[in-house]
Image: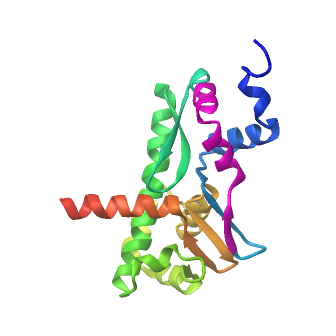
Amino acid sequence: MNNKENSFNSIDASQSIEIYRQLTQGKVILKKNYNELRNELEENSLYTVLFKHWKHFSSLYQHIGYKLEFHDAGNFYYLRDVSDTGIDEADNNAFKIQVALLLIGRYFSRTGRNLELLFIPDAGFDEKDIEELKNDNEYSEILKTARFNRGWDDALEFLIKRNFAFRTSPTSYFISDAGKAFLEQLIEMYESN
């Protein structure tokens, strides 16, 4: 095999390592990430690498027991474990993400605000909203059922750690494109029933 045929030669190893690290930690790789220093969304170079070298990464992950998935509506990549042992954890993580996002969306709707504001960095939700959520006994019980032991503190960290939400300041947040896609899918499923 010459160098032109070896896809590993056309991909920066440090980027490949970072992609693997993030995906195996349960993160999604978004088209745009939030840069806290600049207070703006910016293109994600890891997303670009995945997009340009889809066949390479798809084959690579297949060989180590994963399936690289692309979520078109949310413009993000994620890994799915194809073995039986990883399905429970992946399902549990998806459930936790859905619960947290659904409760945030439900709260936002109840306060009469447009859900679209949740997805805008300059709008989103803040500490006042979190305090209101914490004071809602029904929501707190639902979070406990989803195994968020420290309530909203755990739920927010869980969403942020996996790129479903971003922190814009110590007390302000917004939902990422991946979170938006999850929430919109949940709303669509709810409305169709």
* Residue at 55 percent of width and 46 percent of height: 77
x 75%, y 12%: residue = 1
Work out whether residue 123 or residue 135 is closer to the camera in this orientation and state it. 123
Residue 106 locus on image (x, y percent): 36, 74
Quadrant into which the C terminus falls: bottom left
Q: Main secondary structure of the magenta part?
A: helix
**Is 79 above or below relative to 184?**
above
Give the x, y percent position of residue 184: 37, 63
Residue 157 image position (x, y, % from top left)? 61, 63
Task: Looking at the picture, tell me which residue is in the foreground, 62 or 132.
Answer: 62
Q: Residue furthest left?
A: 193
Is residue 170 found left or right of 58 in the rendered image?
A: right
Q: Is residue 37 magenta?
A: no
Identity of the residue furthest to the front in this view: 4
At 69% from the left edge and 78% from the top edge, which residue is drawn?
169
Total label count?
A: 0
Instruction: Name the residue rendered at 59%, 77% in the picture.
Output: 121
Q: Which residues are magenta?
A: 40-61
Q: Nearer the viewer, residue 162 or 72?
A: 72
- Does residue 163 lie above or below 140 as drawn? above
57 lies above or below 184: above
Say whether residue 51 is magenta. Answer: yes
Left or right of residue 130: residue 104: left
Q: Measured from the top left, where is residue 95 in percent x and y?
A: 42, 52
Q: Quadrant of residue 34?
A: bottom right
